[in-house]
Image (cartoon, rainbow, N blue to C red):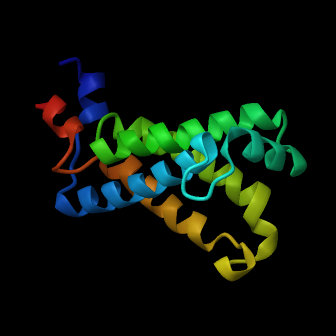
Amino acid sequence: MHPALHSLFATRAGFGISVLRILVGLIFMAHGAQKLFGLFGGYGLEGTGQWMESIGLTPGYAMALLSGSAEFFGGLAVVLGLLARPAALVLSVTLIVAIFTVHIGNGLFMSNNGSEFALALLGGTLAILIEGAGRLSLDRLLAR
């Protein structure tokens, strides 16, 4: 395997990061499913697009498609541990945008729609980005 590819798939992490990765990935998949498909009480692409447009993220439909796809498919990649580092990078960027466009003005706590939950997820995605997918991952199998 080419050294650059090996460094993409390699992981130093054990089972703990695998548990974190799977839980964080499932949360992202659920959020993406809300945006893309209207599942779990979500508004689907049309409704999410209208909301994004209302907060200045334009064009709203495209932003809903991009963020929903990043969350759903990035979350799926994280759950599987397949290309987990690139997926974690995309999810980290998505979270930073959400923090600075939606949550930062509301303080820290979730009760006020603050940044608390997004920061916790950001911690998870950054850990995956740094450590890799962990022992129970497709990335680890590919790196062998």
Report the quarter where the N terminus lies.
top left
User: Which quarter of the picture shows residue 70?
Assistant: top right
* Residue 117 seen by the camera: yes
Report the quarter where the C terminus lies.
top left
**Taking 56 as reference, is 86 left or right?**
left
Q: Position of residue 49 (x, y in %)?
A: 77, 41
Q: Position of residue 137 (x, y in %)?
A: 21, 44
Q: Nearer the viewer, residue 99 or 56?
A: 56
**Taking 141 as reference, is 55 left or right?**
right
Q: Which residue lies furthest to the left in this view?
A: 144
Q: Which residue lies furthest to the top in this view?
A: 2
Marks counted in the figure total 0
* Residue 109 seen by the camera: no
Q: Residue at x 81, y 50 (%)?
A: 51
**Taking 40 as reference, is 127 left or right?**
left
Q: Position of residue 96 (x, y in %)?
A: 65, 53
Q: In this view, does 52 lie above or below 27?
A: above
Q: Residue at x 64, y 34 (%)?
A: 66
Q: Residue at x 57, y 69 (%)?
A: 117
Q: Where is residue 42 in the image (x, y as percent from the top left)?
A: 63, 54
Q: Which of 112 and 39 is in front in this view?
A: 39
User: Which quarter of the picture shows residue 84?
Assistant: top left
Q: Which residue is drawn at 32% across and 55% down?
A: 22
Q: Is residue 96 above or below residue 59?
A: below
